[in-house]
């Protein structure tokens, strides 16, 4: 994930209570990347 995509996703997490809770409950970093991808913030680097 590029730095700009990470910054945008972080901003989205801060403004979206539901998404913030989903991130808190994510069991692994891969789940957080999946959430980011679902919101349009695509990761181009492998885990």
Image (cartoon, rainbow, N blue to C red):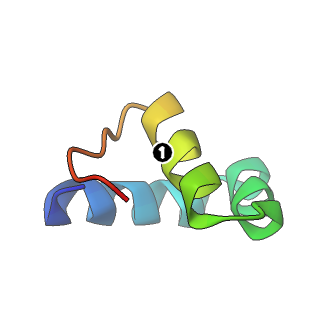
Residue 9 placed where, x, y %? 41, 55
Residue 41, relative to residue 1: is it above or below? above
Q: Residue at x 29, y 46 (%)?
A: 43
44 with respect to 39 (left or right) = left
- The mark tally for this picture is 1
Which quadrant would the N terminus be assigned to in this image?
bottom left
Residue 12 placed where, x, y %? 49, 54
Which residue lies under the disc numbered 1? 36
Q: Secondary structure at mark 1?
A: helix
Q: Where, by quadrant of the figure, is residue 10 drawn?
A: bottom left
Q: Residue at x 17, y 66 (%)?
A: 3
Residue 20 placed where, x, y %? 70, 61
Q: Where, by quadrant of the figure, is residue 30 drawn?
A: bottom right
5 with respect to 36 (left or right) = left
38 with respect to 6 (left or right) = right
Q: Where, by quadrant of the figure, is residue 41 drawn?
A: top left
Q: Residue at x 48, y 45 (%)?
A: 36
Residue 23, relative to residue 31: is it above or below? below
The furthest residue to the front: 47
Which quadrant would the C terminus be assigned to in this image?
bottom left
Q: Residue at x 42, y 63 (%)?
A: 11
How busy is the neighbourhood of tag 1: few (under 14 within 10 Å), some, or many (20 plus)? many
3 with respect to 41 (left or right) = left
């Amino acid at each position: 994930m590029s730095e700009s995509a990470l910054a945008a996703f972080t901003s989205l997490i801060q403004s979206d209570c539901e998404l913030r809770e989903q991130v808190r409950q994510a069991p692994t970093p891969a789940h957080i990347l999946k959430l980011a991808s679902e919101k349009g913030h695509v990761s181009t680097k492998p885990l």
